[in-house]
Amino acid sequence: MKTIRLILLLVLATAMTATAQKLKSGPQVVTFFSDVDDTEQPYGLYLPKNYDEKKKYPLVIMLHGAGSNHRLSLRRVFGKSNANGETDVEATRIFPEWKDVEYIVASPYARGTMGYQGVAEKDVMDVLADVKSRFSIDEDRIYLTGLSMGGGGTLWIGLTRPDIWAALFPVCPAPPKGTDDLIPNALNLPMFFHHGDQDQAVPVSVSRDWTKRLKDVGVNVSYTEYPGVNHNSWENAYKDEAAFEWFSKFKRNKFPDRVLFNSRNYKYSSAYWVRFDQLTPGTLATIDAKFTAPNQLDITASNLGAFTLQLKGHPKFDASKPLQVTVNGKKVKTATAESISFAEAQGKWATGKYEPAATAKRTGAEGPIGAAFSQRHVYVYGTGGNPSEAELKARAEVATQAANWSFYRNAFLGRIMVFPRVLSDKEVRPSDLESSNLILFGTKETNSLVAKYSDKLPIQLNNASANEYGLLYVLPVDGHYIIVSSGLPWWTGAQPGALPFLPPALLALNQFKDYILFKGTTASVISEGYFDQNWKLSPEANKAMTATGAVVFTK
């Protein structure tokens, strides 16, 4: 009887395997589930013909430009531009046939036109994770490319995580502010820029300057400039599947002899065999770590309090032999180990693991304000203080305006497809407290959640000052961020940027650090800046805020 049952189970398993649904080859659209707003998010996908799950494939991540989408960018990277007279709307509807390549290609939608930071950046990394979970990917042959806004995203995402990629292929890139601080991170990352010399959207000087500065660092960088070509340089750059041919020359260097790495955030804390353990968020920390000979390391670090060298697997490291390490010109007594941590105290470096205090800034608890909006979050307005029906409606409208990511900007920029929830303080569930960052509007008198966390909040606005002042800050509480927005909304008086990729309420977030107190509009700042390493205000900030009489310090 047991034998018959076993045979039946084997037959059933075989039948299920034979009839299991598999994706077709060629271009298509699939989705991943985003925990930012509990939505299915699309991305374009190309599977080569005769895909063999037993074989490891190279992967190309392609980032679209402003006003574009995942379907168009999948066409672009294969050199398929619009037909004569065809609009982007028309071209989006179909995938034309194109030459097969032995690459898997994924093109994130990334919420539309919002740049490639914040939620869109998370989407790109989620797409990468989703593709790797579905298909057999060669980890040493993962490539990143994009055009215009997507070219800027290629630089930002590529250089904040240089050890993921084998090569970058930016086309007429428009990088986010501060990306050029990361140029040294490209030392071990081949790059190929493309730009038209008549580009009226992104000046050709961007690629020229980047190429020069990368060469000065020693990066393997190439550059092609197209005479007489405007902002459509991708038609030349991607023609005849040229990107795939160029990518085929490179594999990731997992263990370079020298690592240059710059970062302002714990979020981007490691590259290759180097990890930053203690830095000051918002201040550029740098390291130059290199093997000068087998088991001999020379390290130069700045604005860095602690770091770790993860040497296991490096061809110039031998765990059976003595290790010599010099940090900032001085030898540090070091035992030989596969992972060695260093910390600075009173200007001297020594081996030892950095242990942050319970209140210290760290990964996932470093700010700034915008970080809370890059992950799962909910907007919460208050119902306290016995408000009239009109006042309650006004409170809800402020929270709704902040949450309106899908504000219609124009036909080109379209909407950002992010759909966070808006709740009253009475509607917030325990699961929301456990899983979400909280964007809290009001004061402890008007919002019960502000009151709930009152003993943990460093600053609070006097309810009587709510019509004159605006207070906004971020704080980590119980494993998540809390944003407190008391008084005037943070976008009061905010001016649109040169590239208005975000709706007004969200665009304003880009300029903020950890906190801001303003009077009337954000153009009249009383005090703004970063909390210190233990989430405390500086004496100067405390003095400036106290002078207004508008705030109370609770910690």
Image (cartoon, rainbow, N blue to C red):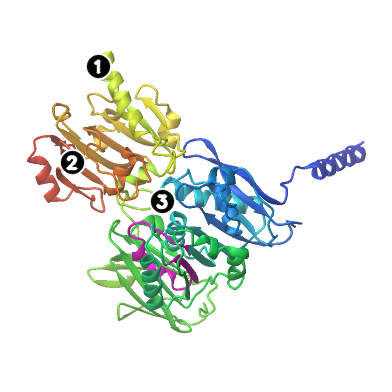
| Residue placed under numbered mark 3 in the picture | 117
Is 373 on the left-hand or right-hand side of 453? right
| Residue placed under numbered mark 2 in the picture | 517
- Front residue of this view, candidates 172 and 440: 172
Is 456 on the left-hand or right-hand side of 406? left
Q: CA distance from mark 3 to mark 2?
A: 25 Å
Residue 70 sits above or below residue 321 on the image: above
Where is the C terminus found, in terms of image quarters?
top left
Q: Position of residue 415 (x, y in %)?
A: 44, 38
- Secondary structure beneath dot 1 equals loop
| Residue placed under numbered mark 1 in the picture | 387
Identify the residue at the far left of this view. 547
Residue drawn at 45 percent across, 34 percent down: 419
- Residue extent of the magenta highlight: 171-196
- Front residue of this view, candidates 77 and 140: 77
Identify the residue at the far front of this view. 85
Q: Position of residue 217 (x, y in %)?
A: 38, 76
Amino acid type, label 3: Gln
Is 378 on the left-hand or right-hand side of 7? left
Viewer can see residue 334: no
Is 193 on the left-hand or right-hand side of 399? right
- Secondary structure beneath dot 3 equals loop
Q: Earlier in the sequence, mark 1 or mark 2?
A: 1
